[in-house]
Image (spheres, rainbow, N blue to C red):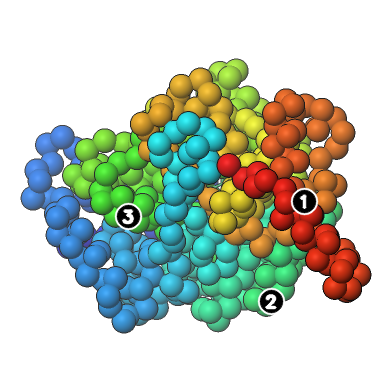
Amino acid sequence: MISSHQLRCTGCASRIAGDQVPSDFRCANCQSLFEVVYPWSLATPETTRQDLPNPAALRWLWQERRTSTQAIDQSGVWRFRDLLPIVRDLERVTTLREGNTPLYELPRAERALGLNWVLAKHQGMNPTGSFKDTGMTAALSVAVERGFEWVACASTGNTSAAMAAYAARAGLRSIVFIPDGKIAWGKLSQSMDYGALTVQLRTDFDGCVRLVNELVRAHPIYLLNSVNPYRLEGQKTPAFELLEQMDWQVPEHIIVPGGNLANSSALAKGFAEAKLLGLIQRLPRISIIQAEGANPLYQAMQASEGRELVPVTAETRASAIRIGNPASWQKAVNALQSTGGWCEQVSEAEIAIAKAEIGAEGIGCEPASAVTLAGLKKLAADGRVGKEDRAVLILTGHTLKDSDYTINFHRNELLSEAEQASLTSAQRGEAAELRKPPFVLDADRDTVLRALEAQMQQPTTVS
Ligand code: F0G
């Protein structure tokens, strides 16, 4: 059975033991980030089948665990623990039964885009409402095993919510650095609710990252940003769960939002390991979508095919991905290149419409997640995604995370005049149809019935 792991530098390929890693998770030789490797994931062409975990046995085991009453089996992350042996004592794993998220079909989007398959893996249906929970259960369990009392992160809101919750469950204390006034209220409230020490810094996310690095260099505090490679071991498991939900068929496309640019590589690692083990025979293309105002990867791919990234000053209402200097950009470039995916950018107005469309499917998501549908439209328009292809959008956060955004859209108070003007007349018409502002009426029978009867006579507009 697989029992050990190491950390391998993604820059110079040097390998170290897990507990030898510097507190900022950067290689002492070359400052690059690490990835977790296992004896089986280092398999060479000479490795024989017998040296690798057996795919049929794994599939059976993972399925069996679904009916178990053990917390660790009920977790949609630790159910796949055979492929993330990063903690020795499984009794001490901190889990909120994360993962196990639904895979939905989006029929409205299929019709609108003329595609046969548009699917959404809704990672917002995790315990704290975002995909971060899958990574946090993994890295926080490592923090517990290594004896840390304090954990910390810089965040645009979701990492901090997840970290605060898992730290509270484990009895650890947590420090959150967030950009003052730049995160959604739902996320800020979670960090307070779960008892974190919440520090609002008068800077942006990139400024918060600088400060949290100073903090962990000065004190024995465990850093839980996605530079921590154990986070990505948890975040790779939705790849296995998705494949299981699709009966081990491989979708042609996975589409993810890009912010600090770690999640794309986590999923790519999951699919690559599944292929290595013979669970699947080919990889899906992983495409990354950024907001136009926070698009350093998009620019890097255009200018230098990802050889160099120039940080930008980020500005977008999709506050989760308001990041100008993404830590894991090189990992994201590898994910794009190893899977043959694309990086696209989408405008504020395109994000707003896509978010309302996902809401109109009865599903909903936070603004950053909606870039996936806006990006899919671009990939479908020029044939990069074909009619028969199965495209899976990774919806990263729950719609309740940022209800201000939703309300402003429906009241037509979100987009500026210039942003509205950037829309085609068809898009403007669609936005108008999607908007469902509340009616404010006197509580009088005739007034209410007359107003509603007028509405009932309108033809249904949702396609
Ligand atoms: N979607 C949501 C809802 C997010 O919260 C984030 C990142 C992303 C997408 C982008 O993922 O960074 O791996 O490319 N949020 C981080 C945070 C930065 O602090 O919550 P990524």
| SS for dot 1 | helix
| SS for dot 2 | helix
Q: Is residue 154 above or below residue 337?
A: below
Say which label, 1 or 3, has the lower sequence index. 3
- Report if the CB atoms under discs 1 and 3 are less than 8 Å apart: no
Position of the C terminus, as image quadrant, is: top right
Would residue 400 be found to the left or right of residue 45 on screen? right
Q: Give the labeled residue for mark 2.
A: 193
Residue 390 sits in which quadrant? top left
Can the viewer see residue 308? no
Q: Is residue 258 above or below residue 242?
A: above
Instruction: Tell me what residue is drawn at x 61 percent, y 51 percent.
Output: 360
Three-letter amino acid code of the residue under disc 3: Gln
Disc number lying in front (1 or 2): 1
Cα–Cα span, label 1 and label 3: 34 Å
Q: Is residue 365 above or below residue 253?
A: below
Location of residue 376 in the rendering, given as x and y in whole percent from the top left corner: 53, 34
- Estimate how packed mark 2 is, as few (under 14), some (14 to 19) or many (20 or more) residues with alpha carbons within 10 Å: few
Residue 142 sits in which quadrant? bottom left
Instruction: Tell me what residue is drawn at x 64 percent, y 58 percent.
Output: 399
Residue that lies at the very extreme toward the right in this rendered image:
442
